[in-house]
Image: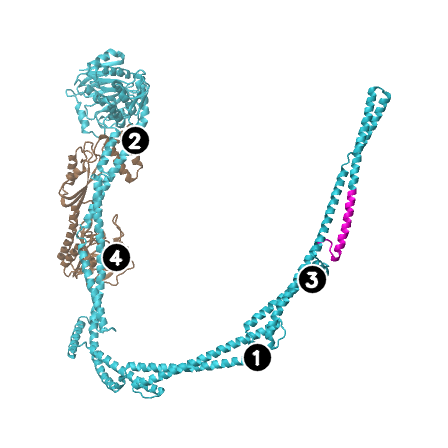
Chain colours: A cyan, B brown
Amino acid sequence: MKLLQLNIQGFGKLKSLKIDFSPKLNLIWGLNEAGKSTLQQAILAAFYGFYQGSRATTAEKQQHLRFKPWTHADFDLQLVYELGDGHQFEIVRNFADDDIPTKIFDAVTGKDLTPQFKIRRHGNISSAREHLGMSREIFEATVFVRQAEVKSLQNNAGLVNEIVSLLDSGTTRASAEEAIAFLEGQIARVGSDRARVKRLPMAQEWLKKIQEEREMLLRDRDSLREAVLKKQDLEKTLQKDRTKLLQFQYLILDKRMAELAQNFKRSEAIRRRLKELRENYSELEGAGQVSDSLREGIVRKFQTLENQKEQIGEIREKIKQQQTIVEQLARELAEYTDMRKLSEFLTYEEFDRLQTRWNVADRALKRDQDEYEKELNRLSTQNLDADRLQKIYQLSSEETQGFREQEEELGRLDREIQSLELEQRELAGKEPFTKSVKLGIVGLAFLGVLLAVPLILFHLTATGVILGAFLITLSAGVSLYFSGMQNKHEKNRMALKHDLHEIVTEKMEKEAFYKHALQPFGVKDFKDLLEKRLQFESLSRKIDAVARSREGLAAVEFQLLKYLGSIDIQSLSEEVLQNVGAQFKSFFELKNQFDREKRLLEETRKDLARVQDRSELTTDSLLERLQEAGINEKDPDKALLQFKALVEKKKECDRLGREIEKLQSELNGLFAGKSEAELLEQQEAWTRRRDTLLAHHPELKGLSSGWSSQKLLTEYETLDQKRQEMEKEVERLEATIQTVLTSHRPQAEIEEELAAAEKEVRRLLKVRHALEKARDTLREVMESYHRDMAPFLNQTVGRGIQAVTRGRYKDVRIDPQTFTIHLVVPETGDMQPSDRLSLGTQEQLYLLLRVAVAKHLSENAESLPLILDDPFVHFDHNRLENVLVFLKQLSEQNQIIVFTKDRAIHRWVEKNVKPEDHIILELK
Amino acid sequence: MTFKILHFADVHLDISFAGMGFPLEVARRYRESLRGAVKRLMDLALEEAVSCVTVGGDLYEQERFTADTGNFLAEQFTRLDSVPVFIVPGNHDPLVPDSIYKQVKWPENVTIFQHPKLEPYPLNEAVVLWGLAHPSPSWRGKPLENFHVPDERIHILLLHGSDMSNVPAGKVTHAPFLPEQIRKAGFRFALLGHYHQGRLTPEGNPFMAYPGSPEPLAFGETGLHGAVLLEVTGSTVQAHPISTQTYQSVREQVDVSQLTNRDAVLTKIQEALEDKAGERVLAQVTLVGTRHPDVIWDMALFNENLPKNFLHIFLEDETLPAFPLEDLKEEKTVRGEFVRKLLDDIEKASDDQKEVFKDALTYGLFAFEKKEIFADN
């Protein structure tokens, strides 16, 4: 957007002022109070009016009034501007009217465009908002560059803050970061759990305290409830127990009175009874003279005597039985006559040993005989004659040796024959020439002769003759050699044959002789002879064995028959011996038994005698004791009867004595030592008390119990003890009930304070949540926005700086987090932060950023003018020049309006800017 | 001869005003005034020389009672001497084992119904009083179901229960019944308790009466607050409402939209409450509208400077801050984005979240202007 024309009829001190703006550089020069600021406000007011909301604020009203001209009535203006798309508009405002009538026209066609916009009160029309795409606040903040804003370029932080604030809030006053920090501060004011002295934790502390107070109260209220319930239960129980106590009281009295009456009756009965008993006792008193020890002694003696009699009876019975057994055994023994005879010679053990020896010898003989028979049978199966075997066996060692030598000689001859035969075969195999060789030799010889003859005959030359002779000689020589060889061989063969014949003949002769010698023994050779000899040896051993066995058996038999002859046994066999052995054994067993029984009988008889002796002694002792007791009877049985009668008397006497004692004791105890008069008096008192009780509690009448008064009293005392304890407990509970809540405030108050605390905590929590939500949202939005912003600014500022520095700087990097600016320094090619660059470059960057921000903040992305309000007052000459050069360049792309009082700027513009590219307005 | 019954109910001694937001001292005084109401009712009974007094339940609050409360009631009833007092325990003072009704040594003239079943007490030859006790705080028995009085005497029902034909908003019902059931059961009149806003029903020829609580127990309660005097003359039964209410409540709304400073706000509040002041007046003032941006909004300050001649003034703030949200949300700034984002969040939020997000929007915008949320530092 560019301002084209401003026509002010009246605005502040400005009157009838018309400005045709240059699209590029505009210088509004004027000294202080010339109206520069007024003119800026006029521009603002032209676009946005004075009132932004539906209600006029005081400040707005004040601002409106402030620019009302004092000296004339005109208070209106018109502003013509052109947007980036070329459209031109004219705003007409009349500030003199409070309603500030405002119109907007198409500056070219003159069409009234006012209805197209939203119109509120006091000239609040949305045209600027829609055309420029921003609010008045943002417009003012972005388009206008004040003195202080450029001043803050001393450091990069200042630069950054300015730009960031504009982006964040459309003002240079507050950035999102600052707003976030402010929110953090507010959150801190609310407080967290760690910050104990802040609002929220204090409120929470308060809440907690009240909650604890309420908890304690509720616990005490529970205790109260428990105490009340317990007290009620106890009181119910007490009520029942009191009734029961009354009942006990009544029953006790009643029972006591009944008991007393009964005791009276009882004492009477006892007295009567005592009299009787005493009479009886005196009658029996004599029996009481026998002491207990004497009586017990007598009883024991009687008992002992009785036992002894019993014992004697048993022993006698036993003797009888034993005698019967002994007699029986004697009879049985008498039947063993033979065995008795035998027993005179030997014991059963000795017989048994002999029998065993006989059995062994008999079995050995039988075994040996068996083996002998077997051997004989075996020999007979081999057709071996025993006689012959015996003859062989009887040969002397020399004879045996002779046979051996003959055998050996025959063997030697045999070997020799074999050797010669072998030699013969070898010789036969060693024919010097084969048949073919022989033929060949003959042939050659013949041939030689054949050749020689012609040679000699027909070639009678020396050579021929020699040659012929040679051939003939050769043939003859060969024939002779070969013939000699053949004759030798034949000679050898014949010699060999002769030797062989001789040896064979010798062998045959010796062999015949040897066989003849062997023939009586029935063997074929020496080996056979030896085998047969061994066989006979085996047989011979068996014969010997049989003989020995027989001898052994005979010896045993001799011994046995020596003894058994006494019982007419002449021969022995296994059966006989077994028979005898069995009988002999039986005899000895029976005899042993007989002897044993006889011994036992003797001992039993001795026992009997002993017991009888003791019994006599006992009888004597008993009679003595009885005498002591006054019984002089000598017969123990009669004495016993008398004694029993005495004992009975004594018992009765004792019994009477005990009964008397018991009754007397009872009598003494009936009234506990009280006199009759005392007892009667007590009876009367009890009666009175009972009657009083009945008068107050008639329901007790008729009550009865099976318990004694003592038991009733015990129960009463126990119950009364319990009652007292319960009453104490009831008192204690009552005290608790009365006091348990006294230390607390009324519950309603606590609950009310609790509700207030809860409400406050909720409120503060809500505030904190809202603050945190605001902070978090703002942070999120800020980061995203800055991140998105950076590329746009990079590009815009980059293009700008490239243009204004004629390409010296072109690469700009703006950190979206920190908004620090970096530039590529052409000298080094490095990225440098802007604060390392010259102030001039920084200022350029700043102004470019302002332009970029303004463009960005315009919803329509309108390029907006830059209106500078004397921002360079503190610049030195060089710096000023630099910035003016920059502005001039910048004006190529953005309309620049500079308000200043600096003459130097005035001069510079005049000098350095083409007339068509600028205007200078002097305000006076 | 006229048989008079003075009937009251729902005194709720020891009640807590936690939900009402009273300052503690105000709550204490109000609570104490309920005892005053009992005293006044006893005075009234003596003045009217009633034949008996009936209490329709919720005489005290079981959860919060003290021995002091029990002793106080016993003492007050003793003043009536031989005039019988009949009490039906209600849902707030049920006949539980540790009830005051079982702990206090009541004077002889006090009869407390003991069972959750209607039982008769003949008041004289002609009039019989029927009542029952709630056995627990949550008893849901239906007392008039299948019930009919046994004879032709005048039977009066004393009941702590809920008239289901007209239940006050938000009231939990106990011992429900319908008016026609009273007639059908044969009762000539029902002396009731449970609803705190009293009424005689039906209008013109009532046969049932809620006396209401002697004083309002919630802000803005209307209706009868007092007692009912029932007169039985022959076969005629007439009920007369008597107000014992001494506390009033007023509600006002103050629009602050055009006001540009704090004093103007205070002045407008005072104007709204003019002619309504009183030591026993509770006022609720709700501030509405859009706050002028010039006004330094300080609720604590407003509360401190409210008119003092009221029992208490509840000041509620329902104003909105003056932010030009329509303009702000169009900005291409972080602030504009913040506004857009939060407006979107508010749109999507639940009701609980909405309030928080709205405040977040305000605080965020305040933060850009470095405007404190807490007026005090």
Secondary structure state at the residue bearing disc 1: helix
Of labels 2 and 4, the one closer to you = 2
Q: CA distance from mark 2 to mark 1?
A: 147 Å
Q: CA distance from mark 3 to mark 4?
A: 133 Å
Secondary structure state at the residue bearing disc 3: helix
Dot 2 or dot 1, earlier in sequence? 1
Secondary structure state at the residue bearing disc 4: loop
Q: Which residue is mark 1?
A: A337
Q: CA distance from mark 1 to mark 3?
A: 49 Å
Q: Which mark is residue A376?
A: 3
Looking at the rendered structure, whether the residues under marks 2 and 1 are on a common chain is answered as: yes
Instruction: Residue type at mark 4: give it.
Output: Pro
Of labels 3 and 2, the one closer to you = 3
Q: Are marks 3 and 2 in contact (CB under 8 Å)?
A: no
Against B96, is A708 above or below? below
Q: Which mark is residue A781?
A: 2
Determine which quarter of the picture holds residue A249.
Answer: bottom left
Q: In the picture provided, is A514 more to the left or to the right than B119?
A: right
What are the residue bounds of the magenta stretch? A498-527
